[in-house]
Structures are given as C-alpha cells and as structure tokens.
Image (spheres, rainbow, N blue to C red):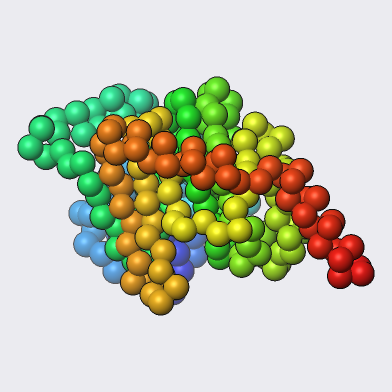
C-alpha cells in the first residue's frame, strides 16, 4: 500500500489526502470515523479533505437521519475526472508561466550596474554552459555572424534551429569550415561517421538556408564574431583534452572589428563549395576511382 500512496502523492495528492482517498477507494459508504480509522489519521484532520473531495466530485456525500456517509464515485469515471483535472491544472500553470515570463523578460539583469559588467567571460572545460552561451549569442544577434569552425563530435540540432531563426530575422552568416570529417552526423535517425561528400552535402544544406560558406584545409581556432560586437573563441590544442580546454567571450567592439578583419583575410584565401567539389573530383580521378 505504501507504493500506491507514493504514486498518489506524485500525481498531486497530499499525504493525508492519499490515505483518505485509498480508504474511500477500498471501502463502501463509510462514515468519517471509519475513514479516519482506516486511513490511520486523526479524525479532525479529515473533514476539510472530505468536503474538498465532495466539491471536486471525487466522492459523494450521503446524508441519513443518523449519520453522514461518504462513497467514492465509479472508478472509470473517477480516473477520467482526475486525468481531466490534471490536464486543466497543467494548462493553467503553463498559461501562468507564459504570462509571468512575459513580464519577467524585460527585467532580466536590468539592475546590473556598471561595476558588475565584465568584458571577458571564461568558460572552463567541455560542458553544457558553453553550448548554452553560444546559442544565447546567436539568439541575441540581429545583423551578422562570422564563424571559423572545425566540425567536432556531434553536430548540435539546437544550433541548427537557432541558425534558422537568425536567417529568418534577416541575419547574414558567413562561415569558414575546416575540411574535416572528424565528427558524427544524425542520418536516418542514428549518429554516423561522415565522408567528405557528406561534409559537402551538409554545407550545401546550410547554404540553402542562406549561409555563405568557404573551406580551409585547417582552421587554427574556433572563432565567432557576433554583430561586430562580441567575439567567442574556443581555444583548441591537440595536446589537451576537452575538459582541459577553455572558451572566451570577449565583449569589446574594437577587438570584434580586429577579428572581423582577420576573418576576412582567411575568407579571401578559402575555397568555395564548388571549388572544393572540383578538388575532390580531381583527387578521385588521380587515384583512379
């Protein structure tokens, strides 16, 4: 019975409500005294709960010349009723959540003083914080994002969704990718290793969304510049594990312009998708494939 009581509590009943509910569910036309005895709780504690149960339609009150009895409603009706009540309660809470955060969002960090503001943030190790921060920077950008990137590990679907939203806002993304296949891509519902052809297909899909893309044989560091105001740098070192690496977020417009100029130097040296495809074709022919 303890397991059933725990389950009742998990769907919203209090400890005493769970005990009274179970006593009613197992019994038939019980008085308050009988319910208290069966539920093993003080009799004065049950009257308000029984009134609430009756009001909610969980049980019926049956009045006789001598006593007041309580009887739970039919189990199939009861189950549907509780399910509907839970769904209605959930919708109300979600509506309150939306309403609450509609008022809260403008207040986010609104009282952060000049002394509290920092121009450099450091994120140590490979963790969710770095992904969350990067997605926030995309979400807060409006005009242009410059990215130098080497695909590594698993490609984030969240990142792809935020990029699509950015394109819809009219933002321009220019990316320089390393010609690397050291990552896994979700194909047909499962994660699979990729070929250079898969890399090109992936980037062609990005290009269809509006992303401007070029390639380098090697990208020295992961760098992103947001609206020429903020720079995100993920420091890469072959001799360090992911957990030892660090990311920097630099909020300095002059530094962002410097990194933009550096990006443009690499952009001019990089190959287009068509140029990379020609290179692959030439290499295949030279190998006799």
> In this rendering, does residue 169 appear at all?
yes
41 relative to 157 in the view: left or right: left
Q: Position of residue 96 (x, y in %)?
A: 37, 31
Q: Nearer the viewer, residue 259 or 97?
A: 259
Q: How many marks?
A: 0
Q: Quadrant of the C terminus?
A: bottom right
Query: Is 152 placed above or below 47 here?
Result: below
Q: Nearer the viewer, residue 126 or 93?
A: 126
Query: Is 176 placed above or below 210 here?
Result: below
- Residue farthest to the left? 115
Please tell me which residue is depicted at 37% across the width and 51% down the height of the picture: 233
Please tell me which residue is depicted at 38% across the width and 75% down the height of the picture: 240
Query: Is 106 placed above or below 46 here?
Result: above
- Residue farthest to the right? 288
> In this rendering, does residue 35 appear at all?
no
Please tell me which residue is depicted at 55% across the width and 34% down the height of the picture: 173
181 relative to 133 in the view: left or right: right
Q: Nearer the viewer, residue 8 or 289?
A: 289
Q: Nearer the viewer, residue 156 or 277?
A: 277
Q: Position of residue 99 (x, y in %)?
A: 37, 26
Q: Quadrant of the N terminus?
A: bottom left
Q: Position of residue 137 (x, y in %)?
A: 39, 39
Q: Position of residue 168 (x, y in %)?
A: 58, 26
108 relative to 232 in the view: left or right: left
């Amino acid at each position: 019975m303890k397991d059933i009581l725990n389950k009742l509590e998990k769907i919203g009943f209090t400890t005493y409500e769970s005990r009274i509910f179970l006593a009613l569910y197992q019994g038939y036309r019980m008085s308050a005294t009988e319910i208290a005895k069966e539920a093993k709780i003080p009799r004065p504690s049950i009257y308000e709960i029984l009134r609430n149960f009756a009001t909610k339609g969980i049980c019926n009150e049956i009045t006789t010349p001598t006593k007041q009895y309580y009887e739970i409603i039919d189990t199939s009706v009861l189950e549907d009723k509780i399910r509907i009540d839970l769904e209605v309660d959930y919708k109300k809470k979600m509506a309150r959540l939306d309403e609450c955060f509609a008022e809260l969002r403008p207040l986010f960090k609104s009282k952060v003083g000049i002394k509290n503001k920092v121009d450099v943030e450091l994120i140590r190790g490979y963790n969710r914080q770095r992904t969350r921060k990067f997605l926030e920077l995309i979400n807060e950008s409006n005009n242009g994002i410059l990215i130098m990137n080497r695909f590594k590990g698993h490609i984030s679907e969240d990142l792809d969704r935020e990029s699509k939203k950015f394109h819809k806002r009219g933002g321009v993304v220019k990316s320089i990718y390393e010609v690397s296949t050291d990552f896994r891509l979700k194909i047909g519902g499962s994660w699979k290793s990729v070929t250079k052809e898969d890399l090109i297909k992936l980037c062609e899909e990005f290009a269809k969304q509006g992303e401007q893309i070029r390639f380098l044989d090697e990208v020295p560091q992961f760098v992103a510049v947001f609206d020429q105001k903020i720079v995100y740098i993920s420091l890469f070192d072959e001799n360090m594990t992911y957990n030892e690496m660090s990311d920097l977020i630099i909020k300095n417009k002059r530094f962002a312009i410097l990194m933009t100029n550096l990006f443009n130097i690499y952009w001019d040296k990089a190959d287009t998708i068509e140029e990379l495809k020609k290179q692959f074709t030439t290499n295949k022919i030279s190998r006799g494939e």
